[in-house]
Image (cartoon, helix red, strand yellow):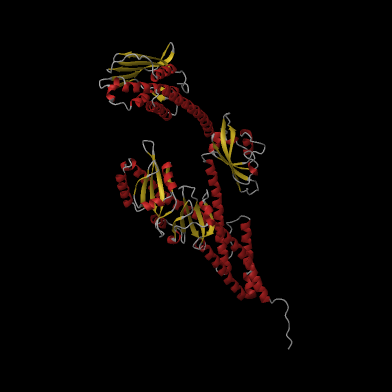
Amino acid sequence: MTQVRRTGLSLTTRLVLLGLAAWLPALAVIGYLESELRSAREAEVLEAARRQTQRATSELDRFLEGTRMMLTAVSTARGVRRFDEANCSMFLAGVTENLASIRSMVVVGPDRGLHCRTGQIEEVEKIDPMFLVEAVAGPGFRIGRFTRFGTEPYEAGLPVAMSVRLQTGETIGVVATVEIRHLAELASRWTLAQEGALTVADADGVILARSPYPERFIGTRVPEAFQHWVRGTEIGVERARSQDGTVRIIAYKPAALAPAGLYLSTGIAEQSAFAAIDAARRQGIAIILASAVLTLLGGLWAGRRFVRHPVASLLALAEAWRLGRRNQVSDMPGGDEFGVIAEALDRMGAELGRREEDAVQSEARLRRTILAAPHPFMLHAEDGTVLAVSDSWIAQSGLPRTALTSSLDWLRDHVRRDGPDDPVQSPFGQNAVVGGMEREVVTVSGETRIWDFSIVPLEPLADGRSLCLTTAVDVTDRYHAAEQQSLLLRELDHRVKNTLANVQAIASQTFRSTPDPEAFRQKFSERLGALARTHDMLTRGQWRGVSLAGMVASELAHVPNPERIAVRGEDCTLPAGMAVPLGLILHELTTNAVKYGALSQGDGRLFIGWSAPIHDGEGRSMQLDWVESGGPAVEPPVRSGFGSRLIAQLARSLGTGEARFEPGGVVFRLRIDLPDGADAAESVPI
């Protein structure tokens, strides 16, 4: 029997294909929805990972701050500051015993030596010697590197140090070793997302704490593929496969950022983060497959009745969404497969409408944020349209808001151009963020200010116009401060040269008058000490002047039996240029009184007094009297020594001086000629 060959497709097949084809628009819409939801979820996961890392960083910083405060408290102990090794070690042992987080402690003295400690000396010797040196060099709190003390994962520690300056001017370092076990337990208590991970490492990338599997990773290095995270300079978020094989969204903080010296990263498992979206996708696919089966069973009648109208309705809904009418819903009755899809699309439309509303509100918030920004901010388009401008821009430029009609006109009229293609005046040719552009800005009042501009290109507007955010910071004060600093450096150079000249002159004159080496060393050291004390007072006063009472008190501070000394006079500030000669005069008089004068005997007395500055016929001046009494008999010297010559010469540089050798003691009267300006000469030659 000959079989008849059929050509073409049967009507049933065609209806089935037609029914299946009717689902293509729905598939496209659902695919679009899934893509939008996944994109939104990706943004949420990235932000969640970033916030998770920020919380972990905050917890770590809180722990380190507590450790820093503990080290600061330890540094105030009497035994620590006085290098009393027995009491210091006992105190450190008590602190270590009461703190589960601390493995051992050691105090490093100014000589870089270990003055007291707790724990085994072998463990202390395993700490990087350079870290112990840096602990003294300072300043402040610093974090070391992972240090292993044994073969077990937790037989290790993290050295931390606090540099402390003593009242003597010397610096000591208090070093503590944080237990790695405690750090790991602390990290394990931090809240992470489901199947999340956390890693803490030192600046070399050696892992200090890890969750999960701490024993597996502590003491190992972060893989080379991720070392750029450790050595980076900015917080970042990336998708990567962790060492335990789980794909995660990882947010990381480089070791260079606070708390400096520690790297931290946390991750959210990608599979868990997108589980709901994947389930929704599977559910959508299941619905589509079920509907396809119904389509196959429906036949021609079902195809004609339930395919054409639903498809048309769905297409109309999709077209409405394309035209921006997100609030439009389908007119299909619920109950069947197409009704379920229509309801899902209606929900999606409502969700998209809500997101568009959120976008509008977000734009409004952006405008309000720009308006309230503490620095000049301006959001503008390439045609000069100002979309938003901060109040600080208006206030600092002096231009009324209503007068700011074009950003390009304002930039052209008020910003001094830096070359023909100045990016500040032509901001729309930039493809990336450009900053650090200092320009002179002329305000409406005519004042010239220095603004540091930055250009941030943004996504174009809906009509295609380019958009950018121009920000600025008024750095006029910083600019002038830099100029002032340069001036101060030149002035410091001048003062140093004068100081060296004074030291050279003192050394030369002392050597001429004192041939004995030991006597020369003693006198030269004493005079240098007087010069150093004067310079110390000048430095504390920022070289603007020096307290006369302070100078007198400084020179008499080490004189025995201070009750024999009377000082009278209202404190006043002398110009910086007079400090060195007056300090040397007071030193020579004090030295002479202690060795040979009134203060060399128990009944001797010394009176120092000065008058307030006055104006007389010769200008502005004041008088200082040095009166010794009750000492050994005084006779005028046959010849003048270096001290007498130095006093006479320095007195002439300050004004006039007169020395009388009364039987009861030396009387010296100094008239100080004060300048009419704020400062005296930089120095006085010796």
Left/right placement of residue 387 relative to residue 130 reads right
- Residue displayed at 59% across by 33% down: 440
Q: Quadrant of residue 380?
A: top right
Q: Classify the position of the N terminus by image quarter.
A: bottom right
Q: Residue 391: horizontal and vertical position, in percent?
A: 53, 38
- Residue displayed at 61% across by 44% down: 468
Q: Residue furthest front?
A: 516
Visible in this render: residue 505? yes
Q: Quadrant of residue 511?
A: top left
Q: Is residue 219 above or below residue 562?
A: below
- Residue displayed at 58% across by 64% down: 342
Left/right placement of residue 607 relative to residue 375 reads left
Q: Classify the position of the C terminus by image quarter.
A: top left
Q: Residue 183: horizontal and vertical position, in percent?
A: 40, 54
Q: Residue 144: horizontal and vertical position, in percent?
A: 44, 49
Q: Nearer the viewer, residue 584 or 455?
A: 584
Q: Nearer the viewer, residue 28 or 661?
A: 661
Q: Nearer the viewer, residue 65 or 464?
A: 65
Q: Is residue 157 above or below residue 447?
A: below
Q: Residue 459: horizontal and vertical position, in percent?
A: 61, 49
Q: Is residue 556 above or below residue 611?
A: below
Q: Residue furthest left?
A: 603
Visible in this render: residue 544? no
Q: Residue furthest bottom?
A: 1
Q: Nearer the viewer, residue 341 or 611?
A: 611
Left/right placement of residue 458 relative to residue 184 reads right
